[in-house]
Image (spheres, coloured by chain):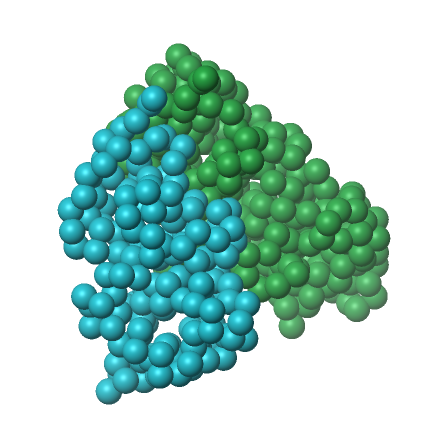
């Protein structure tokens, strides 16, 4: 019978070499909050567990030139405690505080949340409205992918077998400072979202100069609602406009019915969550 | 059999033992005699397996045993060695915050991490701190009361 193996590389280069050689047989692990339950239910068959938690360069939050850079090993608890994140992108802290529970947040990493590629991923939704991009490396090349092009389907991303996330970045900007995230779950802790909505907004003289809207648990992947964004761009804010946008949100999402909620409820509530977030930002 | 030897301290005592790559810290601890760490859901939902790992509360069923290599683990049994741990244990007893007792180790360890980092008594903060720990008996009020009382006493 095949057994799991374990390697704990100390550098990024060492990790990329292992991934190049072992390909699908290697499984990167960090916080393990998803991996261990997956091993238990045999969703993951025997592999080489490549524990990257010792790689310091993949951890931490920095401002470099004109970018905010988050290392993929940064835990959700570390995000909550970051003054830089509070200043530049408070919406990430809002989402982090809704993420699982305080004990899970001590270990779960932002990179892990993204590569798991859950349609409900709490960190993905606000990162979408921050226009984040993902830095990816393999032994062959380095590349950058916009987060909105990173997810392919539930559990699927553009990452190749030999690639790993080495950074999550976004620009410090006025619109990124002004965002609001709402998650609806069945309870306040350890809930997987029934639906979640993030809005980042810039208003000039009562006109929407820029808006970004994203939603979770309402499509096969966390999505940007570009139709709603286009509809709202450069329009003067009014109650009537918001009501129209709410209907557009309900039309644009593509939810399914599952154990947590029905398609109809998700469609309806995502519009409502959008309205709440939008009103929070404009009132 | 693929096994790797690790060294760690549990409740301030050094131990070294072998663990399998896919073994959880929970299973490893129980296999090595630390059966005070309770096994509940084994998927990170219930919190009864909580330990303190390098000063942070963690659900030991979703931590690899090998990731505890060279780290410091505290379980409920070690709490009697620490002042705050003892106070929490006594307060739980005095407030009747225990019924079946299965969630208690996790509750006390989650509370310990919270009180180590937050000195101002705050009921809402306490509720959030134990939001990853399920209790099916007490309705939580007595647990929150017990932790709050220690926070108040600590502030004096």
* Near-viewer residue (B79 or A259): B79
Image point (57%, 50%), residue name: A122
- The x, y position of residue B27, in whole percent, is 38, 43
Q: Is residue B47 visible?
A: yes
Question: Left or right: where does residue B16 sit relative to residue A256?
Answer: left
Q: Can residue A174 be seen in this view?
A: no
For the C terminus of chain B, the quadrant is bottom left
* Near-viewer residue (A75 or B16): B16
- The x, y position of residue A160, in whole percent, is 52, 20
* Near-viewer residue (B76 or B144): B76
- The x, y position of residue A205, in whole percent, is 66, 65
Question: Left or right: where does residue A103 sit relative to residue A240?
Answer: left
Q: Which residue lies furthest to the bottom in this view?
A: B156
Image point (48%, 53%), residue name: B40
* Near-viewer residue (A121 or B142): B142
* Figure disc tally: 0
Image point (29%, 51%), residue name: B34
Say which quarter of the image contains residue A55: top left
Say which quarter of the image contains residue A86: bottom left
Q: Is residue B121 above or below residue B34?
A: below
Image point (61%, 30%), residue name: A156
Q: In this view, does A217 lie above or below A148?
A: below
For the N terminus of chain B, the quadrant is top left
- The x, y position of residue A226, in whole percent, is 72, 43
Chain A display color: green
Question: Left or right: where does residue A125 sit relative to residue B20?
Answer: right
Chain B display color: cyan
């Amino acid at each position: 019978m095949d057994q799991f193996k374990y390697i704990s590389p100390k550098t990024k280069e060492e990790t990329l070499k292992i991934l190049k050689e072992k390909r699908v047989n290697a499984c990167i692990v960090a916080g393990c909050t998803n991996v261990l339950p997956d091993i238990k239910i045999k969703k993951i068959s025997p592999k080489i567990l490549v524990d990257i938690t010792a790689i310091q360069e993949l951890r931490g939050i920095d401002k470099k030139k004109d970018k905010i850079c988050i290392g993929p090993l940064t835990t959700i608890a570390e995000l909550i405690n970051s003054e830089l994140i509070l200043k530049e992108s408070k919406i990430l802290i809002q989402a982090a505080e809704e993420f699982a529970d305080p004990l899970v947040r001590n270990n779960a990493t932002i990179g892990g949340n993204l590569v798991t590629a859950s349609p409900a991923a709490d960190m993905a939704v606000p990162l979408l409205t921050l226009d984040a991009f993902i830095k990816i490396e393999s032994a062959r090349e380095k590349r950058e992918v916009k987060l909105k092009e990173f997810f392919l389907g539930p559990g699927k991303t553009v990452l190749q077998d030999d690639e790993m996330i080495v950074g999550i970045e976004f620009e410090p900007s006025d619109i990124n400072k002004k965002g609001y995230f709402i998650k609806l779950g069945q309870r306040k802790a350890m809930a997987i979202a029934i639906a979640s909505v993030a809005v980042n907004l810039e208003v000039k003289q009562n006109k929407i100069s820029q808006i970004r809207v994203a939603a979770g648990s309402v499509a096969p992947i966390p999505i940007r609602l570009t139709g709603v964004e286009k509809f709202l761009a450069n329009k003067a804010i009014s109650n009537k406009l918001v009501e129209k946008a709410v209907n557009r949100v309900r039309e644009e999402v593509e939810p399914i019915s599952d154990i947590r909620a029905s398609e109809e409820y998700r469609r309806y509530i995502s519009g409502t969550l959008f309205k709440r977030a939008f009103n929070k930002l404009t009132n | 059999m693929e096994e790797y030897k690790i060294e760690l301290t549990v409740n301030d005592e050094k131990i070294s033992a072998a663990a399998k790559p896919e073994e959880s810290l929970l299973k490893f601890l129980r296999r090595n005699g630390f059966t005070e760490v309770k096994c509940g859901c084994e998927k990170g939902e219930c919190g009864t397996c909580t330990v303190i790992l390098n000063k942070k509360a963690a659900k030991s069923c979703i931590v690899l045993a090998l990731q505890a290599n060279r780290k410091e683990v505290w379980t409920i049994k070690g709490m009697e060695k620490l002042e705050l741990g003892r106070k929490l244990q006594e307060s739980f007893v005095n407030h009747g915050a225990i019924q079946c007792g299965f969630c208690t180790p996790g509750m006390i360890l989650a509370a310990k991490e919270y009180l180590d980092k937050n000195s101002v008594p705050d009921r809402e903060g306490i509720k959030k701190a134990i939001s990853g720990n399920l209790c099916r008996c007490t309705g939580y009020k007595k647990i929150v009361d017990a932790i709050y009382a220690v926070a108040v006493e600590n502030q004096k």
